[in-house]
Structures are given as C-alpha cells and as structure tokens.
Amino acid sequence: MKILIPAAILLTAAGLAACDRPTSTTTVVKEPATPNTTVVTAPTPTPPPTSTVVIDATKPAETKSSTTTSTTTVDTPAGTATKESTTTTTTK
C-alpha cells in the first residue's frame, strides 16, 4: 500500500504532462459580410417660379390714429381721487 500511493502520483503526473496543452489562446472574429445594397433617392422637386413685388417707396403708408381720453372721479374718506386714462390706437 505504501508503494501504490507514490506510484499513482507519478503516473498521474506523467499523464498530465503528456496532455496536449495550448500555450496561448487565439480567438478569430469574422465580421459578417455586408450585402450589396442599392440606395434609391427620389428626385428633388423643382421650386415654383418666383414672383416679384415692387413697393413704391415715394408714397407714404396710410395710417389712421385715434386718441381716447377718459377721466374717472371717486370720492374716498380722505378726499376725491381722479384717474385719467388716455388710449391711442394707430392702424396702417
């Protein structure tokens, strides 16, 4: 029994040493092949014809203006208070 254990150890060590072990690992990654693609684009639309607007700078713009003034008087315990409002409206 004393001889069996050392013999088994030697046989196991010799068997493991005889195994084919790789010294380095290499991984090869292949990129997938890209399929041939055709890109179809729609033709760009042509812009509509432009029109020309001529503004006569010598003629002034017509404007209308109106002013409204209102006065409000309120009696308070301290006396009379007056409020005056002026509203001006201008239209072109």
Image (cartoon, rainbow, N blue to C red):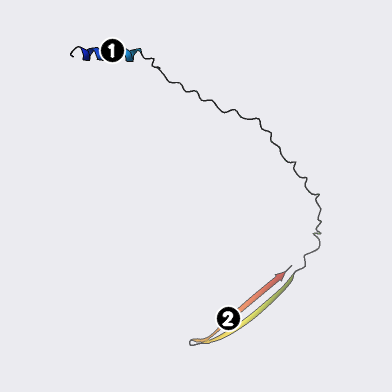
- Looking at the picture, tell me which residue is in the foreground, 38 or 88: 38
Q: Amino acid at mark 1?
A: Leu
Q: CA distance from mark 2 to mark 1?
A: 117 Å
Residue at figure coordinates x 59%, y 83% from the top left = 72
Counting residues from the start of the chain, the first of labels 2 and 1 encountered is 1
Q: Residue at x 21, y 13 (%)?
A: 4
Residue located beneath label 1 in the image: 11
User: At x 57% / y 85%, what residue is drawn?
Assistant: 73
Per the image, label 1 sits on a secondary structure element best described as helix
> Image height check: is 37 above or below 8?
below
Residue 70 placement (x, y as % from top left): 63, 81
State the SS at label 2. Answer: strand
* Residue topped by disc 2: 83
Q: Residues within 10 Å of mark 1 (few under 14, many from 20)?
A: few
Task: Give the mark toward the camera: 2 or 1.
Answer: 1
Spot occupied by residue 45 in the image (x, y as percentages of width and height):
76, 45
Q: Is residue 46 left or right of residue 77?
A: right
Q: Is residue 14 above or below residue 46?
A: above
Observer-nearest of 24 and 51:
24
Residue nearest the observer in this picture, 13 or 7: 7
Q: Quadrant of residue 33?
A: top right
